[in-house]
Amino acid sequence: MSLQETVCQRCGKNSVVTDVESHEIFCSNCGMVIEERVNDRRAERTFANSPTNKSHTGGKISLAKHDRGLRTMINPFDKDSAGNLLSTPMKSSMKRLRKWDSRSSIKRHDESNLQFALSEMLKVKEKLSLPNAVIEKASYVYRKALEKKLIRGRSISAIAAASLYAACRESETPRTIREVATSMGIKLKEITASYRLIFKELELKVPVVDSVLCISKIASNAEISEKTKRFAINILKKAKKQNLLAGKHPMGVAASALYLASINLEENRTQKEIADAAGITEVTVRNRCKTLKKLI
C-alpha cells in the first residue's frame, strides 16, 4: 500500500487498517471505508516441518496436467488440521475416500490417453531442455487433436511428439524433428506423418525458423567461440538481405555460416564436426558454403 493510502482522507490521521475477513480497507478512527473487495496481500505461509500445507492459495492452472492442476487433494497423513492423530474409524473412512478419489480421477479413455501423452511430453522436456511455455503450447495442440478425434487409430506417442514439434516451431525454439523423434523413441516417419496430419486438420500457422536462432545451439555443441558466432550471424544477416536463404534448411545454412566463420577467424573446425553438431550431413554444409562464400 502506498503512503497516500495509509492516511485517511476524512480525518487526516494515519490510522488505516486492512480487514482480511471482510476484504475492506477502512479508518479505525472515523470508520470511513476507503476500499472494498481488496485482494489478500498477506505472504504465503509454508512450514517445512508441518504435515499440512498452510498456504492459502493453490498451485497455478496448467494445461500440461491432465486435470489442469484442479484435482482434489486428500491429505495422505492420518492427522487432522491441528496435527492430532485421527481415530481408527476416521482412518478407515479416509482410506476409502482416497481409494475412491484415485479411481474416479480418470473416468474416460480420453483422460487416460491425455495423461499418458502429457507425461511423455514432460520426459522430453527434460531431455531437450525445453521451456515451460513450449510444453503448455504442445499440451494445447494435443488437446485440440484429441477433441477432433485425430488420435483414434494412431500412436499416442507419435501425435504427442508431433504436437511438441509444432509447439517448438510456433515458439521459434530451435529443435529439429529428428531430435524430438529420438527423444520420444519413435520412428521419424511416424512423427512426420502425424505432424502433417495435425498441421492440416488443426490449420496451424507455423512461422519459418530463423537460421540465426540455430547458431547458438550448433556453436554450443561444437564448442565454438563467441567471436566466431557473431561473425556467422553477420554472414546470415547479409544473406537474408540478398534473399539467399529462401527455401534453404535453417540448420544447414547456420552450420555452413559457422564453418565459414571458423575458417576466416582461423578457429580450426572441420565440416564433419560442424555437421555432427548440427545433426546434418557434410554434403549439406558443402552445398550451402558455395552460396555463402560470396558474402565474405
Image (cartoon, grey):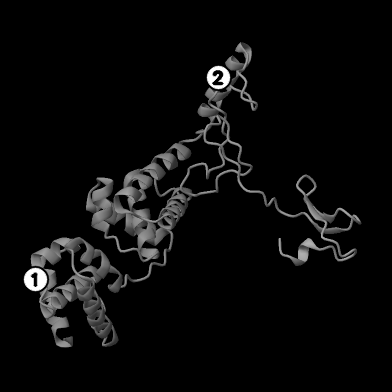
Residue 286 horizontal side relative to residue 182, left or right: left
Q: Which residue is mark 2?
A: 95
Is residue 154 among the parts visible in the rendering? no
- Left or right of 165? Residue 115 is right
> Can you tell which of label 1 and label 2 is closer to the viewer?
1
Res 247 → quadrant: bottom left
> How far separated are the C-alphas under marks 1 and 2?
66 Å
The 10 Å Cα crowd at callout 2, few under 14, some 14 to 19, many 20 or more, is: some
Position above or below: 265 against 255: below
- The quarter of the picture where the N terminus appears is bottom right
The answer to which of 12 and 272 lies nearer the viewer is 12
Circle 1: residue type: Asn
Residue tagged 1: 268
Residue sitting at x 77%, y 54%: 37
Image side of residue 6 versus residue 230, left or right: right
Q: Position of residue 147 (x, y in %)?
A: 48, 49
The percent coordinates of residue 169 (x first, y second) are 35, 63
Q: In the rendered image, which quarter contains the C terminus?
A: bottom left
**Residue 170 placed where, x, y %?**
39, 64
Mark 2: which amino acid? Lys
SS at badge 2: helix
Query: What residue lies at 20% left-to-right and 70% top-to-bottom?
Result: 225
The residue positioned 49% from the left and 49% from the top of the image is: 63
Label 1 crowd bin: few (<14), some (14–19), many (20+), radius 10 Å: few
In the rendered image, the vertical position of residue 121 relative to residue 291, given as above or below: above
Dot 1: element: loop
